[in-house]
């Protein structure tokens, strides 16, 4: 028998019926959950699996304590889902690598010059074998020494030169 999230964990499932998301005057994401007697700032975090960016979203209070879990943003009102998407986009901002122009390695670090959807970016990756995270068969994240993330939407979709430069680390 397949169990649902509510049967596996003690998580409170948040949906359009039991929570209201809104924006504060200063633009912060806020939530009101009467069943939890909570109204205040909401922090969102993606739960595993990380590949799904609209499912299993953890809602936390100011102290980063879990208030509940959104099974899918589609279970919220259009306005609430839009607010949550915008918040997740800010938190998980990751320029998309379109092309690897230059990739060199020295002393265990790799130095990247990439064309991204936000222009040319130069960054350093320490221990590339641990800093390149595969998400499924065709997607990857590269995490630089400053903790910034860069997304490769499709490894197979990269040009041959870019793919050959990153292939050693995959």
Image: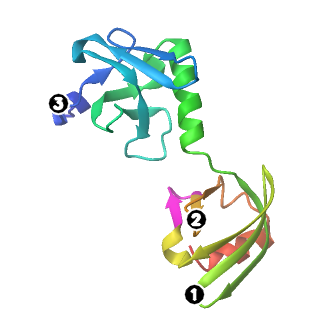
Residue indicated by mark 3: 7
Nearer the camera: disc 3 or disc 1 = 1
In the image, is residue 28 above or below residue 155?
Answer: above
Q: Where, by quadrant of the figure, is residue 97 drawn?
A: bottom right
**Front residue of 66 and 161:** 66
Which disc, if any, is residue 143?
none
Q: Left or right: 71 with respect to 22?
A: left
| Structural distance between the alpha carbons of marks 3 and 2 | 39 Å
Residue indicated by mark 2: 146
Start and end of the magenta stretch? Answer: 132-139
| Structural distance between the alpha carbons of marks 3 and 1 | 45 Å
Question: Which quadrant, please, contains the N terminus?
Answer: top left
Residue 4 visible at all: no
Among all residues in the image, which is located at the extreme bottom? Answer: 107
Q: Secondary structure at mark 2?
A: loop
In the image, is residue 142 above or below residue 91?
Answer: below
Q: Left or right: 3 with respect to 165?
A: left
Q: How would you rate the neighbour count of disc 3 (Cα within 10 Å): few for under 14, some for 14-19, many for 20 or more?
A: few
How far across and how far down the image is residue 163, in percent?
A: 71, 70
In the image, is residue 166 above or below residue 70?
Answer: below
Residue at the spot x=17%, y=32% of the render? 10
Q: Left or right: 67 with respect to 87?
A: left
Nearer the camera: disc 3 or disc 2 = 2
Nearer the camera: disc 2 or disc 1 = 2
Residue 71 visible at all: yes
Which disc, if any, is residue 108?
1
Question: Which quadrant, please, contains the C terminus?
Answer: bottom right
């Amino acid at each position: 028998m397949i169990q649902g999230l509510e049967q596996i964990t003690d998580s409170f499932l948040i949906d359009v019926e039991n929570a209201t998301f809104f924006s504060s005057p200063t633009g912060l994401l806020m939530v009101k959950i009467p069943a939890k007697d909570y109204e205040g700032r909401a922090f969102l975090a993606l739960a595993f699996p990380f590949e799904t960016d609209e499912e299993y979203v953890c809602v936390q209070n100011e102290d980063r304590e879990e208030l509940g879990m959104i099974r899918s943003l589609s279970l919220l009102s259009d306005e609430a889902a839009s607010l949550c998407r915008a918040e997740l986009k800010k938190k998980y901002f990751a320029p998309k690598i379109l092309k690897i122009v230059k990739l060199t390695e020295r002393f265990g670090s790799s130095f990247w010059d990439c064309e991204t959807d936000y222009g040319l970016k130069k960054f350093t990756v320490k221990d590339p074998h641990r800093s390149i995270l595969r998400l499924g068969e065709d997607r990857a994240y590269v995490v630089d020494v400053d903790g910034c993330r860069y997304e490769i939407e499709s490894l197979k979709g990269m040009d041959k030169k870019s793919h050959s430069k990153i292939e050693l680390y995959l």
